[in-house]
Image (tube, rainbow, N blue to C red):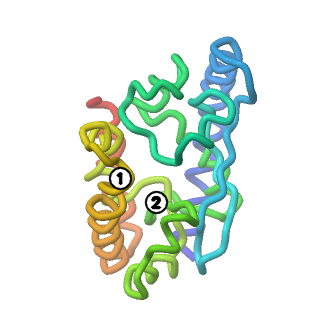
Amino acid sequence: MLKRLFDIFISLIGLICLLPFFLLIMILISIDSRGGVFYLQTRVGINNKDFRLFKFRTMHVNADKKGLLTVGGRDLRITRIGYYLRKYKLDELPQLLNVFFGTMSLVGPRPEVRKYVDLYTIEQAKILEVKPGITDYASLEYFDENELLAKSQEPEKTYIEEIMPAKLKLNAKYIEELGLLTDIRIILKTLKRIIGT
């Protein structure tokens, strides 16, 4: 209950304070390429239920049909403004709407697409017992995930066999340490990491 109240309060304050910034980003996206300013993707949330995740659009329209993984910051599917939005994680800001409406939390395991969730073992699937979040231990550890995948000859294989299992272990660590103080520490570390980028 306290976690939910914290999520509502912070997300509402964030949405109000960032509104002018949101409008600027929306204008830049519209000028830079054709298509809507938001990108909605189906992800798997708590209790293995699908939900729609909000992001600012950083790719050309229908680019996700060429693959779900983004490989390197200079992936040709990414727009010019999209590169910078991704670099500074600004494309994730609309997820404050998900937090406010209750489909996500500020901190929690990053929600995955169904394709990869279907590969989880019974043990790994336990992370679906908690609400997904905007940031977590795995987000901090794999802050430059796209660049790691860019170095791989088989990005999807590397993700499935190496990165995803490691991230799931970090998700399990978060669940073991679940608490408001843990969330605050992760939020502060995330902000520090973004500012230092």
Residue 139 has which mark? Answer: 1
The residue carrying pointer 2 sits among few (fewer than 14), some (14 to 19) or many (20 or more) residues within 10 Å by Cα, namely: many
The C terminus is located in which quarter?
top left
The N terminus is located in which quarter?
bottom right
Q: Measured along the vertical axis of the image, is residue 128 above or below residue 83?
A: below
Q: Which residue lies furthest to the top in this view?
A: 31
Would you identify the image quadrant in which residue 153 lies?
Answer: top left
Would you identify the image quadrant in which residue 48 lies?
Answer: bottom right
Q: Residue furthest bottom?
A: 122
Q: Residue 79: x percent and y percent?
A: 55, 21
Report whether 40 appears left or right of 18: right
- Which residue is at 54% across, 71% downward? 131
Q: Mark 1: which secondary structure?
A: helix
- Along the line of sight, the residue nearer the viewer: 159 or 185: 159
**Is residue 109 at least partly visible in the picture?**
yes
Give the residue pinned by disc 2: 110
- Which residue is at 63% across, 27% downward? 60
- Along the line of sight, the residue nearer the viewer: 123 or 191: 123
Q: Measured along the vertical axis of the image, is residue 121 above or below residue 157?
A: below
The amino acid type, in three-letter code, at marker 2 is Arg
Task: Compute the Cα span from label 1 to label 2.
Answer: 7 Å
Q: Residue 23: x percent and y percent?
A: 69, 23
Say whether marks 1 and 2 touch (CB < 8 Å).
Answer: yes
- Which residue is at 68% across, 63% downward? 51
Q: Mark 2: which secondary structure?
A: loop
Q: Earlier in the sequence, mark 1 or mark 2?
A: 2
Q: Residue 37: x percent and y percent?
A: 70, 29
